[in-house]
Image (cartoon, helix red, strand yellow):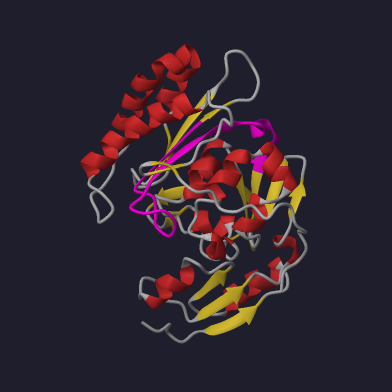
Amino acid sequence: MLLPSFAFSTARSVEEALELWACLPDAAYLAGGTDLLPQLRLGKRAHRNLIDLKRIQSLSRIRETEAGLAIGAAVPLADIARHPAVREHYPLLVECCRRVGAWPLQNRATLAGNICNASPAADTAVALLTLEAGVIAVSPEGERVISVTGLFRGPGQTCLRPGELVTEVVLPHASAGWHGSYQRLSRRQGMDLATVGVLVASSNGGAPPRHRVSLAAVAPTPLRVADAEALLDREGPRAARRAGELARDRCRPITDLRGSAEYRREMVGVLVARGVAALSGPSGIVVPGAGGPGPRTPDPGPQSQGERP
């Protein structure tokens, strides 16, 4: 199916992007486009104007701020996964970025776009929930900070207002050093959405350690399981099975071509227990496929974070 006709405009600043959206009918912002363009092609979305954000220099950088590490809305997932500060302080996000599609897609897709698409199966969403990240959104009325927890409203729905533009995703300093295990089931390795995604994480310091449990593809939105986290905080790895049962009770999966609701629900319990066990492994991070550890995306190592063409 061919793409429908649309006009293409390039913004050179956040202010220009907001002005273009205000004066162009049926407009949408375009960062990576890996979700938007297929949806246009399939008729799931309709826009007469696309506003390209990739020429906005401030959106194409990763920078340290007082609040934490700020990732611009136009930075591709591949750049995030190889950035030294992300690799050192937020390895959970590195692992989840590497699970989005395949390597060519990761060089185009953006973190902001992945969460603004609001898929319940978004791999990066569970990492951002676990890290308690925030989103900076800008509109003509000003700037506001939105917690990732409060961003999602339902499948394909966020709390963003019409014309509001996400400029950065902020990883707080308090979440630096968390490590964990992302357990992901899918029909095949590579280009497929998760059938079930479970991220179990532990704090780097403190005695006893704190825990966080986040789920993808098993509810209308990605979600945290607070009661499972509290149980693991109190009792540690010996409570893995019961924590899995609590997570299983919290999820609200559907049946679709990737799996039945019953299968998803049962696998949540299994994967939470498996994730708790994996926390004591040598690396602290395990990324399995449906039948065991899957291949990792090749790591090209740190590269420059300059503006891309």
Q: Residue 93 placed where, x, y %?
A: 59, 44
Q: Residue at x 23, y 44 (%)?
A: 261
For residue 250, which quarter of the picture? top left
Is the N terminus in the top left, top right, bottom left or bottom right quadrant?
Answer: bottom left
Q: Residue at x 65, y 73 (%)?
A: 19
- Asked if the magenta segment contains residue 79, the reply would be no
Residue 174's place in the image compared with 43, above or below, is above
In this rendered view, identify the residue nearer to me: 69 or 149. Answer: 69
Q: Residue 267 placed where, x, y %?
A: 31, 36
Residue range corresponding to the magenta coloring: 171-200
Residue 256's place in the image compared with 267, above or below, is below
- Asked if the magenta segment contains residue 198, the reply would be yes
In this rendered view, identify the residue nearer to me: 224 or 80. Answer: 80
Q: Residue 242 placed where, x, y %?
A: 34, 20
Is the C terminus in the top left, top right, bottom left or bottom right quadrant?
Answer: bottom right
The total number of labels drawn is 0
Residue 103's place in the image compared with 208, above or below, is below
Residue 165 at least partly seen: yes
